Amino acid sequence: MGLFIAQLLTGLANAATLFLVASGLSLIFGVTRIVNFAHGSFYMLGAFVGYSLMQVLPGAIGFWASVLLAGIIVGIIGLIVEVLVLRPVYKAPELFQLVATFGVILVIQDLALLVWGATDLLGPRAPGLKGVIRIMGEPVPKYDIALIVLTPFVLFALWYLIARTRVGILVRAATQDREMVAALGVNQSWLFTGVFFLGATLAGLGGAIQLPKGGADLLMDFNILAAIFVVVVIGGMGSLPGAYIAAVLISVLNVFGVSYLPQSTLVLMFVVMAVVLIIRPYGLLGREEVAGEHGQVGEPDRPIKPAGTVARVLVALLLLALFALPLAGSHYLVVLATDIIIFCLFAASLHFLLGLGGLVSFGHAAYFGGGAYVAALFVTHANTPMELAFLLAPLGAGFAALIIGWLCLRLTGVYFAMLTLALAQLLWSLVFQWDEFTGGDDGLVNIWPSEWLSDANTYLYLTIIVGVGGIILLRHIAHSPFGYALRASRDSQRQAEATGIDTKKIQLMAFTIAGVLAGVAGALFVFSKGSIFPNELEIAKSFDALIVVFLGGVKTLSGGVVGAASLELTKDYLTRFEYWRLVLGLLIIAVVILAPRGIVGSLRVLFERVRGASK
Amino acid sequence: MSAVLEVRGLSKSFGGIQAVSNVDFSVAKGELLAFIGPNGAGKTTCFNMLMGQLRPSGGDVFLNGEKITGMQPRKVWRKGVGRTFQITGTYQSMTVIENVQMAIISHNKRLFSIKPYATHLYREQAMSLLELVGMPDQAERACSILAYGDLKRLELAIALSHAPSLLLMDEPTAGMAPSERIALMELTAKIVADKGISVLFTEHDMDVVFGHSHRIMVLNRGELIAEGSADMIRNNPMVQQVYLGGGSVFNNEQQSDQSHA
Amino acid sequence: MKGLKQFVLAAVTTTASMVGFVGSANAADPILIGEINHYKRMAAFAEPYKNGIELGLEQINAAGGVIGRPLEFIYRDDQGKPGEAIKIAEELVSREGVAMITGTILSNVGLAISSFAAEKKVVYLASEPLADALVWEAGNDYTFRLRTSTYMQAAMLAEEAAKTDAVTYATIAPNYAYGKDAVAAFKKALLALRPDVEFVTEQWPALFKIDAGAEAQAIERAKPDAIYNVTFGGDLAKFVREGTTRGLFDGRAVYGLLTGEPEYLEPLADEAPEGWTVTGYPWYDLNDDANKAFVDAYLARYDTHPKIGSLVGFMTAQSIAAALEKAGSTETEALRQAFVGLEVSTPVGDIVYREQDHQSTMGAFVGTTALRDGGGVMVDWTYKAGADYLPSDEEVARLRPVSK
């Protein structure tokens, strides 16, 4: 009994940080609809800033003042980010801002490395709260008790702010109906800035308050990201009590998981999230999303047209150039081109879902990595010939997409996105954990192509034929009746259903097609690298694809491919420098601000303007 | 005249609230039947049950003698029922003509074809529908920049694209200028007459109702309280009661109605 | 598009210049070595390592280089991604014309490069990755490994553990391949010495996401006599703090793999655990000539002291120079053959790259942790030669696939 209570208290104490950080994320999303990937970075900054302050400010008062100050300083940093980076792009298509926040992550990572150095910092202990209290004989750290007591007060303070003050009423109103608030004459941009400040402050507080239980290191930002998204989604986007309940639920379950099912540490929270979402599609305390009739903000997509002669000639020339690439004599160029085409196909498959279907998959790497693993597993365990394994990869990926798609398509919007993420993460942990079969994180090695393809040039030809072929196939599908039906299902599901279109079936089919083609990309990948590791299934890989689709222009047909090629080339060049993340981050932010329609979309507008002016 | 649509004992309750109770009616071939009643009377609920967006709590719906109760919207559509909505729901990312083509593609069951180019399919057929509703010159415009009245006409063209035997129109003229309303309903009446389609529509504008329907049904609090010709409805005391001493309302309408006629 | 054009241009010029040089390798041209590492993702470990290499190179080149040419490393960041590492390896080999490849800390990246090396016939010296598979299950002709492997270090700790009368053990290790290998190796080695030992609980926190309070409670619940710890970095710090606060370590023997390495012990400062038996690197107390010479040179060259990574980096440079010298050329086949059975004199003594599995015989320091001047140190340590802690030749032959 004593142990049970002690474990419960550990869980409650762990929930404190999680709740603080997640509530900030939830607020920001609720009001601004920004999926703030940089929230983990604010948390990390809170820890570093808090650490530095605690070195200077002495005693118990100094400690708590440092925590508060760290929160406020991070809040100000958040405010600066909002004003400089996000404000210019509020009008961009939904979710476009996440690209900007991704740039912010990169910048903060390198800046933190510059300022605080690479070594992990061990957090100072809270003065006066170093020891333990015995509860029924079990030791419970005093600081844990402090956190347990403190968190409900924070929750209450936030609740009071939201429920009882004028600002709070505006925030709540904005959560439910942004246009209405704007119509009431509220200065929306300052409201957004204020909420961003508050959200970042909470993240900073979370980072500082966990110092006595941990410390500050450069991996903190990504390490907490998945967990806080899970908490926000389980609790219900925009709901503070929901975030608290979810943080407690996850933390307590985790403590008992550690004791009674020690291997569960990787998957537990994703299992909980998947179960909650399947039973309660909008989280524990969330409301159904009030999506507009067309589901998207920003200007509507333009009608698509078959490629004109000029475009066709250009593509033909590009293909010719690719085929002639080995003549340039550089082996590396061939390898680089192979890599880029593979990534382009992966991005194009996501773009197909995202751009045409309006289906935001946050877990698209599941099909890329999944396909690669299917091929690698057949080669490793069944000595399957490379050619056959190559064909089985997309089938496996497509099958996974079919099942995951079927489960996720009951949900919409961000909840859909989060469930795809959760299920992809389950697949990842399966691969990661089941090492007898999948090699765990040591991966599967020696998955090389057959003799006739082993030359890099030949493999490039294969990649061009299959990869570019896949991209062109996707484009063809976009112009086919199926592609139109997919867009129809996105534009107006009601109208589509009322004119005989089985929208769920269309979307599931699209999900599967995207999965198959991601699987093709995965197969090309595994045989070009000769090995596969779980990181190709990771969240980060899914985000890579997501970023380039938005960067290229989600509302254009070629955005995914152009975005992928641009980013890969830029990265290939920049990673040669020491602070490449800083530069890349700034570059991404610049592109986001200068080209809010994405690279292709903005170039198109620019081109039209120039042509319009010359007329 | 055989009934195209026959509704028997249709009921719907939400929780404890009876939104529609025991409604019976039928629509004859070629008939323009108006469905009126104050806000919250249950018209749209009825519509949604006919088209399958809502599942009835009780009762049955027959289309040309076949039971379609509780069928999904897309299946009801395939049986030959077209529908327009109170708030338009067209495909913003397509051109006007592509919106119509989409419905024709669906009707021809080519939705899962992955052969390009959809934009070349059934163009002539779609164009003739656009001509029918008087917007051939807008065919290539992006749907997202259409005026509201044009969207309504486009929806009509879409609803007609699979040569339906029955058309359900929910507030077809809502949000339109008065002159546009008359024009749209005249257009509808003409098309219906030419093609022998039956129409069931709800409408707030009594001008439209009295001017363009063959028969009128009045729904109040989920119950059918009156049914008959325009004159019969005008003089029905229960209807007048419902419309809050609406005699004057009707008289005004009558006058303007007559001025059209 | 413009980017691509530039790349084509750059590539063509580079290729042209390379073609121009082939056959007339100038005596003064440096021999290039490709170094691939996670400079950003694991900056705390990669930086001391790189410093070690640079120090080694300075000494080698000051002494006239190797086979009459200066030795130079090209450092590239792989972001910790195996796929990226392969791409960079391709570039280093084909565009930069490196003689061989070295590097990586993460085992999975090491394994990916190792597979690449065998396929493309490039020599790869896995300097820091610890996975046993690198030289055994996934071993190949072109891959060699310098650092004392997981198995060797775990066996050293097991030997110490076997001397005590502890019977019940708890293990805690990060939930990934290295953690699992480390626990499996310790169990195997300890059970071989003490069949009566029982493992009462195994804890597997997610890497860098440890829930230390819960882990401490879970171990306490099992009431073990001793604890075997494999956590490191931030996880270790949190585990030590929660465990100490809750009295988990009181009256228990604790064995910590790598815990004595400065990379992990230093961040703990005055909270470093006392009395743990650990492997590590007590640079501060090294008195013999070779070790001391390295430490002094490092202290003189950089503002800071060496870490274990610095030592490995230094020995990497030494090993590669020795192999080149022995091969007398930069040809892959000659270099590969030179590595087999290569003997190198290093700060920790002479090591050999074994013929049977390409593992070097670099050993490890085993000692007890203590506090000194507000920081953790290792005391009562001994250096254990790696050769004594490897499985028998028959077992190695069984583990290692037929020559590939």
Image (spheres, grey):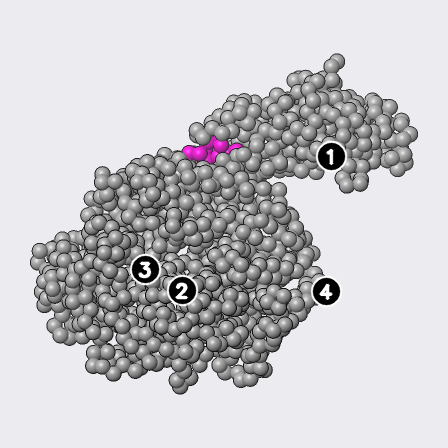
Q: Three-letter amino acid code at disc 4?
A: Arg
What separation in Å lies between label 1 and label 4 (alpha carbons)? 38 Å
Circle on res. C196: 2
Which residue lies under the disc numbered 3?
A: C131
Q: Nearer the viewer, mark 4 or mark 3?
A: 3
Residue at x 40%, y 86% (from the top left corner): C373
Q: Say above or below: A116 vs A516.
A: below
Q: Is residue A129 left or right of residue A379?
A: right
Using the rendered view, name the quadrant where residue C208 is placed: bottom left
Circle count: 4
Which residue lies under the disc numbered 4?
A: A164
Q: Is residue A339 left or right of residue A91?
A: left
Which residue lies under the disc numbered 1?
A: B44
Give the residues drawn in magenta, as a range. Answer: A476-486
Residue at x 81%, y 32% (from the top left corner): B21
Q: Position of residue A401 (x, y in %)?
A: 47, 41
